[in-house]
Amino acid sequence: MTGTTHTTGPRTLYDKIFDAHVVERQPDGTCLLYIDRHLVHEVTSPQAFEGLRMAGRKVHSPERTIAVPDHNVPTTPDRVNGIENPEGRLQVAELDKNARDFGVNYYPMNDIRQGIVHIVGPEQGWTLPGMTVVCGDSHTATHGAFGALAHGIGTSEVEHVLATQTLIQKKSRNMKVEITGKLRPGVTAKDITLSIIGHTGTAGGTGYVIEYCGEAIRDLSMEGRMTVCNMAIEGGARAGLIAPDDTTFTYVKGRPHAPKGAAWEAAVAWWRTLKSDDDARWDKVVTIRAEDIAPVVTWGTSPEDVLPITAAVPAPEDFTGGKVGAARRSLDYMGLTPGTPLSDIAIDAVFIGSCTNGRIEDLRAAAEILRGRHLAAGVRGMVVPGSGLVRLQAEEEGLDKIFTDAGFEWRLAGCSMCLGMNPDQLAPGERCAATSNRNFEGRMGRGGRTHLMSPIMAAAAGVAGHLVDVREMMAQPV
Amino acid sequence: MMEKFTTLTGIAAPMPLVNIDTDMIIPKQFLKTIHRSGLGKNLFDEMRYNPDGSENPDFVLNKPAYRDAQIIVAGDNFGCGSSREHAPWALKDFGIRAVISTSFADIFYNNCFQNGILPVALPQDAVDALMRDAENGANARLTIDLENQVVIGADGTEYPFQIDPHRRHNLLNGLDDIGLTLEKAASISSYEQQAAQSRPWV
């Protein structure tokens, strides 16, 4: 394989992908790493393109660069007429211009293939096993589901990759997270990934690249694997990885930018070697039994504030160290009283979407709960497909009808409420059951309160009007 | 050219909260800019200002003693969350040149070095001692000496810290990575030729 030097002895999947992309290695271990795919969106790229212009530099590999606006775009049908917010409009216009001037691959706002960058990349076959993938967005970890080394970078690094197609990197340590056995009914990929963060904490993965493995991971679809890897960053890890297998190859085959013919055969032959050696050395290992994972929700303002839906709101005294003060602040922000059963927490809104859970399988699962049911009185709901093609597919399957019959708004693709950089936001004090990835203070709108959960848990909460154990609803006929 | 960082002596603001995330450092409504500058006034916006736009007098950077702070001493896992480089841009624009904590989130940590900000990771007991110094405001200035890799507390106690030699070199000399990497164009091109053979589908 390419790469001038590599790790000796048994290697992890991460070691193998890293080694295959080393352009140069310094004696102190600092490496120049080649980047196969660079995804770009409107919020973290304008300053990088401006930097190139000021220095008179070109984009090194426009053919490896893929741009799509997602963070700022409104998700209402009137967006075909343009973006009302002048700053958002300017950022998207800048991306239009930069994509054109520098000749990179581009899916403009009103292209049917537009969507959240981390959904568009895999959907179009840009993301392939064994690649290095970066984007000026922390949820780039999503692409690790394909056995690609994928992580978020800042804008200065975006400029570095645009100019050189490389990144200066030091090797992270290897962490294995194994989920043994089989998930119970009502438990999903989202519950796996939230439970891991609940277990390790938001800094538990700092300095590591995580490889997720075990029977419960192997059993997941690609959509589920993307949900798991998407939140690797919430656990502090540089990246999350899942070794590619037939599930991966089946998903990738035939996508617009996937290899074809003889190239496909050669690619699969290499991809099959992309797994950790049996005797690879791990710096940290976490093992969780799938049977022990319940449907979970977050109660606080950090993704590590995870509890099974059957639990109650904790008290600050349940924690130690700096977390005591943080929990007190979280409970105050969230307006919660210790000891309250989580299933007694009433909600005002439901958000189904985001790069964590905006794929077709997520919409199918939520629709399955909502079929023949309706949002509780006073609860507003929004379904935001992750891409125009996910939306189209859902409409072909009649899912849009199920959502609208249940009282949800059926929106166009974008990041939407997940980060509220667009018109979709919570009002102060408003409480939302959300399928997104961050429950930080103000994330979905100043003063907004976010409880993270799976699509089926969010759908069930919307019907009940409060957080609820979806398994109860699954057991009841409509 | 990046601003050099050699030795800094200044006021440190105490922020003992753990998991201070990038949404707190610079909320999303300020990410709509297409420039790097001007974000300092919105640093920690939702903690710093009341909903009516007035200053929250209880927030540390609004207190007279800390308005000129150049250092933040923070709780664990500072800078977690989004990759937004607007977070270090806002810190820098406000005048913060260094952050001391037990740990930093990975992307934020990288982003600091791109902007002449030094993140210093120290053990818990050292951070606790420096937090106590920081609580004394202008009466307890801290010194961060990057050349010698040491933080000097108000009482003269020295706390050595580790830092990657490549990053230290670039920060001390104000070097920008892109210019250095472009000098390696021949290596990059040679890698690309090899990869075109071994992974032609990429």
Image (cartoon, grey):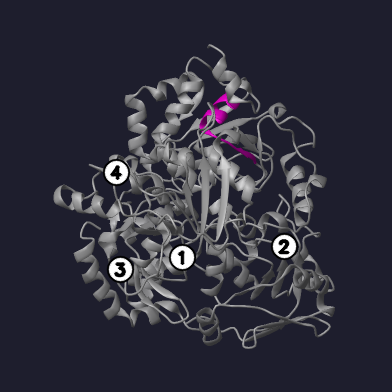
Q: State if disc 1 and disc 4 touch (CB < 8 Å).
A: no
- State which mark lies toward you, 2 or 4: 4
Viewer-closest of A312 and A65: A312
Which label was assigned to residue A59? 3
Task: Give the chain of mark 4.
Answer: A
Viewer-closest of A25 and A343: A25
Q: CA distance from mark 4 to mark 3?
A: 30 Å
Q: Is residue A300 visible?
A: yes
Q: Quadrant of the C terminus of chain B?
A: bottom left
Which label was assigned to residue A98? none
How many badges with numbers are in the image?
4
Q: Position of residue A72 (x, y in %)?
A: 46, 49
* Amino acid marked by disc 3: Val
- Left or right: B7 in relation to A373: right
Q: Give the mark, 4 or 3, whose residue is nearer the N terminus.
A: 3
Characterize the local packing of mark 1: few (<14), some (14-19) or many (20 or more) Cα atoms within 10 angstroms. Answer: many
Q: Position of residue A110 (x, y in %)?
A: 33, 43
Q: CA distance from mark 4 to mark 1?
A: 32 Å
Q: Which residue is located at x 50 percent, y 45 percent?
A: A422
Question: Which residues make up the magenta segment?
Answer: A449-463
* Amino acid marked by disc 2: Gly
Q: CA distance from mark 3 to mark 1?
A: 14 Å
* Amino acid marked by disc 4: Phe
Q: According to the image, label 4 marks what residue?
A: A249
Q: CA distance from mark 2 to mark 1?
A: 25 Å
* Amino acid marked by disc 1: Thr
Q: Position of residue B197 (x, y in %)?
A: 19, 65
Q: According to the image, label 2 marks what residue?
A: B75
Q: State if disc 3 and disc 4 touch (CB < 8 Å).
A: no
Do discs 2 and 3 share a chain?
A: no
